[in-house]
Image: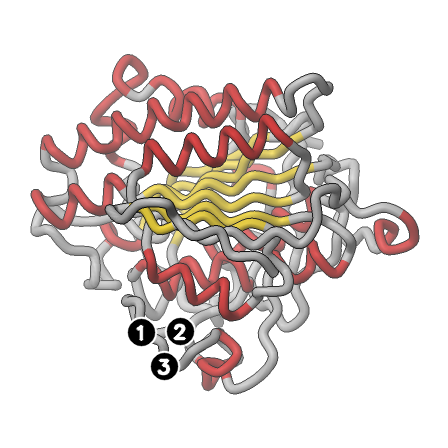
Amino acid sequence: MTSLVPAAAGLATVLGVLTSLLSPAAPTGPAAQADWADPSTTPRVASVLVVSVDGLNPRALRRLGRSRAPHLHRLVDESAGTLNARTQVEMTLTLPNHTGMVTGRRISRDLGGHGVTWNDDRRTPSTVQRAAGERVGSVFSTVADHGGSTALFASKKKFSLWTRSWSDDLDLVVIDGDNRSLVRSLVSDVRSRDRAFRFLHLSAPDVAGHAHGFMREAYLRAVRSTDRLLGRVLAAVERGPAGAAAVPTAVVLTADHGGTPGKGHAEHARAANYRVPFLVRAPGVSAGADLYDLNDDYADPGHGRPAYDDARQPIRNGMVANVSLGLLGLPPVPGSQLGVTPLDLVAP
């Protein structure tokens, strides 16, 4: 494992983990035959990019409209999705919800969750496994186990928890507090090589929300700047590696939480905090379709906050891992709880 240390100090902290120069873009051979989602309703792709926009309140898309957030609106139009997905039930905090995204687990350790209840860069517990008191897999480890290459691009230092937890399963990790620089790193990676799975975390809306209030003007400006960055990301994904044909790639976009004008998002029972988007764009999906219309097993929660034991669940941000794996034709994360029933992404 090789660490790439930044040449100069500042907001950016970059850690690279490169285990090979030529990892396959998608699993091949017998391992790739472990399909668990029906290809007729969950299209197959060679690569998945997850984009988590930290603190993205879906109301911001409506406030900004198409003219001021064209790329987010384009993604809505081209995806099977919903703007009424839910966070984890226990907390609406960044690190617990993001760890749920990549493990497919709820938060509560006593109920089989990942156990990450803190939201800072502490080093004890040192790993997700120690927090849970047991082995915890992730989308990174599942992709790696099937021969695929993975990468993490995050804009907060606290995501180093994932590097410690799945160090052998992450081929590249870039942690950079400058969102524009972070996107340049991702675009460079997309242009230089194929990978089966990438995770991009963008923090600008959350930072502005805490400083000035979520849904205030400064926050909306941060969403607009994030929209421009998303445009660069989508363009890079559509072009693919330089000198090669673009590989079939899915883009999954969600958020860890929303936020309220009072500068916070910790009150997990407030709709402005627990309502998030969940969009899946891939070749073959029913563009513009509502995920609740496509999936009878899941129920639109309206303004409610269903518990995990409710008979019909909402779409949750914790389904990211297994939705991504289904698109890659891979089995769910071992021990996961969310999204184990595959999502239908194609209208019958």
The residue closer to the viewer here, 292 or 201, is 201
Q: Amino acid at mark 1?
A: Arg
First reached walking from the N terminus: tag 3 or tag 2: 2
Which residue carries the number 1 mark? 122
The residue closer to the viewer here, 92 or 153, is 153
Secondary structure of the residue carrying tag 2 is loop
Which residue carries the number 2 mark? 116
Whether residue 251 is visible here, answered yes or no, is yes
Q: Residue furthest top?
A: 67
Residue drawn at x 10%, y 47% is 211
Secondary structure of the residue carrying tag 3 is loop
Q: Is residue 183 left or right of residue 54?
A: right
* Viewport quadrant of the N terminus: bottom right
Q: Amino acid at mark 2?
A: Val
Rendering coords of residue 325 (x, y %)? 67, 50
Marks 1 and 3: in contact by CB < 8 Å? Answer: yes
Mark 3 vs mark 2: give the one in front.
Answer: 3
Rendering coords of residue 337 (x, y %)? 58, 68
Which mark identifies residue 347?
Answer: none
Q: Is residue 147 left or right of residue 315?
A: right
Rendering coords of residue 334 (x, y %)? 67, 69
Q: Is residue 23 above or below residue 227?
A: below
Residue drawn at x 47%, y 75% is 127
* Viewport quadrant of the C terminus: top right
First reached walking from the N terminus: tag 1 or tag 2: 2
Whether residue 84 is visible here, answered yes or no, is no
Q: Is residue 310 left or right of residue 137?
A: left
Which mark identifies residue 124?
Answer: 3
Q: Is residue 64 above or below residue 294?
A: above
